[in-house]
Each structure stands twice: as C-alpha cells, then as structure tokens.
C-alpha cells in the first residue's frame, strides 16, 4: 500500500442524535484507480465522503490526502479534491459559465477560461454556457456539478451517486467522462446503488454497511472469488424423480419438474462431481431429453445482496 | 490568505445584488425618501430645532443608520443563508479556504452594498432637506464600520437561522425597535431622566449619536464612546464568527 492517495484510519462519526454513521473505518485509495463504494441506503457512504471532504467533523480518526492531514493541513488536502454531491444543489439564477468559474476561484486557482472551456466541452455543456442553471434539465445540472468539481483541476474526484436519476444514454456518456479522467491520472471514488455501474467502471470495490467497511477487493478477484455459476437445464418431459445416474450431482428441481438447476464454482469447474460435461453425459445416459440450457454467472449484485444480508 | 476565493465570493455576491437591483437598492432608497418627505418636509417644519439643527436635517443621520443596519443585516444574512438552504454551501465548506476569507468575501460584499446605499440615500436627502456634513472623513468611517459590523451580525444570523422566518425575526424584532428607540428621531435628552439612563444600554444610541456628530458636531454621547462601542461590537461579531467556524456550529454536523 505504498502509493495510496487517500488514507483513512480509525474514522468514526457519531451524530448529535447518537446515530453512529461510521465505525472505525480504515481505508486506502490507490493513486489513479477508480474505487467504487457500494452500500445500501444509510450505510454511511455519504458520511464517509463528507468526512474526507471536510463537510462533516469526524468524532475520531484521521484522514490523509496525498500525505496531508485533512484537518491540520486542510488547504493542501482540499485543493486536491473535487466533490460532486448527491443532491442537485445549484445557485439557480447563475449561468453555467459563472458558476463553474466561481468554483475555480473558490478553490484558490487564478482564472483560466481555457480550462473552463475544456471542461464544459468535455461534458457537452459548452452550448449551454450562458444559460441559467434553473433552465437546465436534471442531467445537465448533474453535469454542471461535475464541471464545478473539475474546475480547479483536482487530482481526486469524489462522485456521490453520479448517475442517480440519469437516463441510460447519459449514464454511458458519464462513464466515458470518468474513464477519460482516470486516463488523465485523476483518482476517482464513486458511490453508487447501481451495481452495474461499479461492475462496469471500478478497479476496486469496497462494500460498506452499518458504517463499517465490510470488504475491499479488486473487482475481478471479487467476482472470481465469490462468483458462482448456475446451469439451468430445461427438459422436454417433466421428471417425477431423478434417475440414479444424476444422484451424484447436487441438482435442484423446479416444482413442475421440467427444469434442473445445477450450481458450480466458476474457478474450479472440474472439481468434485465433474462439472458440466459430466452432468450432460449423465443426462444423456439416463435418456433425459434436454430442450435448452443456459448458464448464468452471479453478478456483483448477487454478491452484494448476499454480503449485506449475511452481515445484517 | 488567498485572494482568488475572496474575489470569487465577493464578485458572486455583487452579481446577486445586481440581479436584484430593484429590491436591494431601489426599494430602500424610496422607503427612506418617504421618511424625508413626511418628517423632514411636511411635519419637520412645525417642530423646533434641536441643538441648532432643523428637525428635517436632524433625522437624516438616524434614518441613514436605520437603513444601514437593516440592509446590512438582511443582505448579509440572506447571502449565507441561501446557500445553506439550497445545499450549495457544500462547496464553500469543502473549499481550501479559511473562515477569514469567507467572511471577507461575504461581509465585504454586503458592507460595500450598504455603504453605497447609504451614500445614495444621503444624496437623496439633500434634495429634500438642506444640510451639510461637518466631518466627512469621520462620517465615512462611521458608515464603513457600522456597515461592516452589522453585515457580520447578519452573517451570524444567516448561519443561525434555520428557516426564512428566523431570517426576518432579528431585523424586525431587534434592529428596527432599537433604532427607533436609539435616537433616530429625537435627541435622548428629550426623554425623562430614567429613560435617558435606560437608553444608554441600547448600542444603536452610540452609532446614531456618533454618526450625527460627524454631520453636525452635536451628539448625545461622546464621539469616543461611539467609536469604542462600534469597535467593541465588531470584535464580538468577529469572535463569534471565528467560534462558528471552529466548532462548525450549524454548518457541519
């Protein structure tokens, strides 16, 4: 963990009402990665981001941003960070250009119209630069928030549910923007409900639940490690009982009896009972007519739901 | 100290003023002019001179103060309350800036507006009542210090308020009564002795008195006391704001 750009140690937050939103969170974000923070509603995702960005004072713990303590050296820490909040909050009567330029100034950078133009163009906001924010659609407003966060050329970008309420096409567009940013060396931390998003984008995934980091893993490893595969076999004729040839396989029959479900580990296909080919051979031997087959690999979503249920 | 964030906040606030010119400049000027017409021109001619100054001229400093206090408070409070209300304050709180820079930006803009407004009203007053300013430099200093101090008070109110009703509460229930009872329309030695003593606890008395001294050289309390009072109030406000940002009161959970 030598090149971590954000290091969080023992971070806890108890709100005034007594609600404990974060419990002893330790987390490292690698320089240049896309890190997805997954968790159900109220798990502590936004609180965690807020504590790193200075919107919430933690009860305990320390955050280092690129080596700078985010409380003691807040200037150095914060100027490296861009934050896109979850809520669409805007100064309604400002124009796009003014509000994005304002953000750059607020973060202590001298005016740079070239950079602002680049940002607006990359988010396809250039045509709207003189529009007041109140006249923009929801997706546009979201992009303005991203433009504001990028106005001061941050090295770290926090996206708190960037694609909530955004249509499919725009979502794809945003993913592309995020990838481009990563290619430019920006580290990206995003929280999301859409597992699809994490699966599509992230290098690493962290799962948070009840204020605790439940798991942090490379995405591919995670899917590989926890991923199960399922083969569903549809039969021509319902089976009343399983033929003896199939007894060695852990099969589940549906109620109608015309479907068999076979689960196997993707990583160790050949282990144990011999895997798919053995099953198909056995079906053939038993004279069971197979109408159709399909396989399904468990997605991050299944993994996530399992994880959260397990620890609840 | 970084000049860019201060400039960004200041310019954005001034832009907001320009967008709301009618409400933020024209309306206070008109409403204050009404006072001049009624008390200065119409009724004023039937009231005796106070300390050798015609009544119409006598009330000008007090009326400018009244407007200066209410406008400073309401403008500065709205400036910080609105981002808090809309949620866009997240940006201010996550920015690499110190509380002093935030205050200079917001309070500076609000105070600038108040001072300009005060000067416009002063110019308008001359159309209705003949008068002159004896100590223009002191007059400007009092104007500036009062505008800054009460803009800070407004800033504090804007952070404290958690609804639009509270935003109006302090200007209506505190500032306006204190100003009306603070010698805007009378000299405090026109009061019975007991109330003369009570009125010295009203901070606005010192502001109005000092400001009026800079116009006509007459005052209810000594000019030094007035100046000391404003500076004291300014320091109290500044310390309060420093405390707010240190503890995150009403800003950070």
Image (tube, coloured by chain):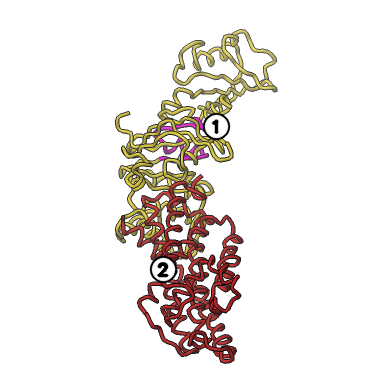
Q: Is residue A206 magenta?
A: yes
Figure check: A269 above or below A162: above
**Res. A166 visible in picture:** no
Picture residue at 51% right of the left edge, 88% below the top: B54
Can you tell which of label 1 and label 2 is closer to the viewer?
Answer: 2
The kind of secondary structure element at disc 1 is loop
Chain under numbered label 2? B
**A172 within the magenta span:** no
Which part of the image, by quadrant, shows the N terminus of chain B?
A: bottom left
Mark 2 element type = helix
Determine the residue positioned at 51% across, 62% down. B77
Read off the chain for label 1: A
Picture disc at residue A283:
none
Residue B186 position (above or below residue A114):
below
In the rendered image, is residue B38 in sight?
A: yes
Measure the alpha-carbon separation of dots 1 and 2.
Answer: 56 Å
Task: Please tell me how crowded label 1 is: few (under 14), some (14-19), or many (20+) other residues with Cα within 10 Å.
Answer: many
Residue B87 in picture, x, y percent from top left: 51, 53
Q: Residue B181 falls in which quadrant of the image?
A: bottom right
Query: Where does residue A155 sit, x and y in percent of width and height?
Result: 33, 44
Write down the colour of chain A.
yellow
Q: Disc 2 designates what residue?
A: B227
Chain identifier matching the red colour in the rendered picture: B
Query: Disc 1 designates what residue?
Result: A210
Which residues are drawn in magenta? Answer: A189-212
- Residue beneath the point at 43% across and 47% down: B246
Q: Residue at x 54, y 23 (%)?
A: A230
Q: Are marks 1 and 2 on the same chain?
A: no
Q: Is residue A300 above or below residue A57?
A: above
In the displayed structure image, the side of residue A211 where residue B145 appears, left or right: left
């Amino acid at each position: 963990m030598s090149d971590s750009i954000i290091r969080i140690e023992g971070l806890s937050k108890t709100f005034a009402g007594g609600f404990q939103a974060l419990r002893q969170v330790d987390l490292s974000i690698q320089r240049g990665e896309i890190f997805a923070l997954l968790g159900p509603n109220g798990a502590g995702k936004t609180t965690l981001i807020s504590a790193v960005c200075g919107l919430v004072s933690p009860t305990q713990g320390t955050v280092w941003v690129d080596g700078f303590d985010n409380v003691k050296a807040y200037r150095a820490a914060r100027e490296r960070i861009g934050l896109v909040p979850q809520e669409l909050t805007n100064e309604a009567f400002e124009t796009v250009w003014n509000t994005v330029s304002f953000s750059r100034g607020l973060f202590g950078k001298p005016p740079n119209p070239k950079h602002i133009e680049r940002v607006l163009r990359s988010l396809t906001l250039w045509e709207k630069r003189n529009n007041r924010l109140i006249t923009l659609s929801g997706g546009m407003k979201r992009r303005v928030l991203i433009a504001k966060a990028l106005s001061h050329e941050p090295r770290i970008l926090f996206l708190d549910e960037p694609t909530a309420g955004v249509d499919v096409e725009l979502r794809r567009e945003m993913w592309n923007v995020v990838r481009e940013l990563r290619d430019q060396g920006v580290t990206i931390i995003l929280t999301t409900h859409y597992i699809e998003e994490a699966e599509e984008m992230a290098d690493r995934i962290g799962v948070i639940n009840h204020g605790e980091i439940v798991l942090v893993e490379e995405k591919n490893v995670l899917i590989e490690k926890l991923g199960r595969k399922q083969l569903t076999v549809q039969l021509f004729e319902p089976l009343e009982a399983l033929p003896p040839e199939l007894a060695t396989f852990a099969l589940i029959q549906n109620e109608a009896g015309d479907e068999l479900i076979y689960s196997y580990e993707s990583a160790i296909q050949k282990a144990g009972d011999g895997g798919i080919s053995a099953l198909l051979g056995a079906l053939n031997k038993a004279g069971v007519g197979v109408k159709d087959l399909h396989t399904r690999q468990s997605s991050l979503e299944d993994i996530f739901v399992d994880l959260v249920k397990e620890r609840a | 100290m970084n000049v860019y964030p201060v400039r960004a906040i200041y310019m954005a606030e001034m832009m907001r003023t320009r967008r709301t010119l009618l409400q933020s400049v024209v309306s206070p000027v008109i409403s204050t002019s009404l006072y001049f017409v009624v008390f200065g021109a119409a009724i004023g001619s039937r009231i005796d001179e106070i300390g050798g100054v015609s009544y119409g001229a006598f009330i000008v400093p007090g009326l400018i103060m009244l407007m200066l206090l209410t406008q400073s408070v309401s403008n500065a409070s709205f400036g910080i309350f609105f981002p808090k209300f809309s949620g866009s304050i997240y940006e201010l709180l996550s920015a690499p800036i110190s509380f002093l820079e935030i205050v200079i930006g917001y309070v500076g803009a609000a105070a600038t507006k108040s001072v300009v407004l005060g000067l416009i009203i002063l110019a308008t007053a001359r159309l209705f009542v003949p008068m002159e300013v004896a100590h223009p430099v002191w007059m400007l200093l009092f104007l500036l210090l009062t505008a800054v101090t009460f803009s800070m008070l407004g800033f504090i109110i804007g952070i404290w308020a958690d609804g639009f009703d509270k935003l109006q509460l302090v200007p209506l229930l505190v500032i306006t009564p204190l100003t009306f009872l603070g010698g805007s329309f009378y000299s405090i030695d026109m009061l019975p002795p007991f109330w003369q003593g009570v009125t010295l606890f009203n901070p606005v008395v010192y502001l109005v008195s000092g400001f009026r001294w800079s116009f006509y050289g007459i005052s209810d309390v000594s000019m030094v006391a007035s100046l000391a009072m404003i500076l004291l109030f300014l320091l109290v406000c500044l310390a309060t704001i420093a405390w707010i940002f240190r503890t995150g009161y009403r800003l950070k959970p």
